[in-house]
Image: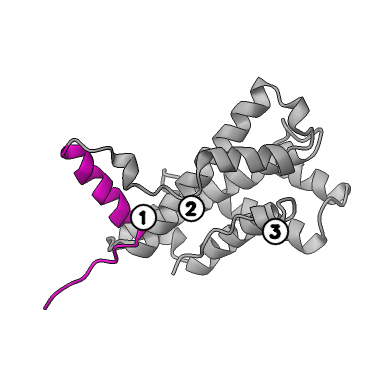
Amino acid sequence: MTIEVNKGSYFYSLLKAHAAQEQGEAPSKYAYYGTPISLLRENITEYIYYGGREKVNDKIRATISNIAYSIQLLEFYINAKNELYLSFPIEKMLNKEILITSFEIQQSLISIMFEGYYKAQAKLKIGKLRKEERFDKEFIDALENERLERNRVHLNAKEQDCVPDYSAFDDVGQVNESINLLNQLLAKRLKDEEKLVLPNIE
């Protein structure tokens, strides 16, 4: 039996880039990392930061870069889930990492979307969104539900819940809800031609 690998896949390109590097070629010729960092920075600065390009300082510039890097990392996690054969614990722990990363990106985006949100913790930030009616109730409720889900993440086992950490993150639906929530948040500011739509995990 011949097993074929999809040559257009995310990880095939990275393996090919690694092989090229070992043979003295430029790996960047083959590697695909997802949405380019420069494009992410540009769109976040132009369309999401409330102050506009002319008010970007070093702190905001660093935050925008961190968001861009995290979005690219999230794409890596999603592709790993969709393209690689993983052990059960690793697969579920990746669910956890996707939830954490997606949540942190959302909170960072909100912190630069509106003035006065930068230093607020997630709970206060979501309460402020609700009070100021920045988004519709359904969307804010979804953010709050995700915050509560995020708070379940821990490494130390609890006395009343002595099970491996990965078992709490076997709900693919919850993971995709988080990805979709991030997509919706980005879509609230990005124009159609700049929209970034992260895929769901399969």
Under mark 1, the amino acid is Pro
Question: What amino acid is found at the position of numbered circle 2 in the picture?
Answer: Ile
Between the residue at mark 2 and the residue at mark 1, the CA separation in whole angstroms equals 18 Å
What is the crowding at mark 2: few (fewer than 14 residues within 10 Å), some, or many (at least 20)? many
Secondary structure of residue under mark 2: helix
How packed mark 1 is, by other alpha carbons closer than 10 Å (few <14, some 14-19, many 20 or more), is: few
Q: Is residue 22 above or below residue 85?
A: above
Closer to the N terminus: mark 3 or mark 1? 1
- Which label sits on residue 192? 3
Q: Residue furthest bottom?
A: 1
**Closest to the observer: 109 or 187?**
187
Q: Is residue 192 left or right of residue 102?
A: right
The circle drawn on residue 98 is 2
The answer to whether the residues at label 2 and label 1 have Cβ atoms under 8 Å apart is no
| 3 and 1 marks in contact (CB < 8 Å) | no
For the residues labelled 3 and 2, the Cα–Cα distance comes to 25 Å
Nearer-the-camera pick, 106 or 6: 6
Asked if residue 125 lies in the magenta stretch, the reply is no
Checking the image for residue 185, the label placed there is none
| Element class at badge 1 | loop
The range drawn in magenta is 1-23
- Location of the C terminus (image quadrant): bottom left
Residue placed furthest toward the top: 58
Quadrant of the rendering where the N terminus is positioned: bottom left
Q: Callout 3: helix, strand or loop?
A: helix
Q: Sequence-wise, which precedes: disc 3 or disc 2?
A: 2
Please state the total of marks drawn on the protein image: 3
10 Å neighbourhood of mark 3: few (<14), some, or many (≥20)?
few
Q: Which residue is mark 1?
A: 164
The answer to whether residue 40 is above or below residue 195 is above
Q: Quadrant of residue 105?
A: top right
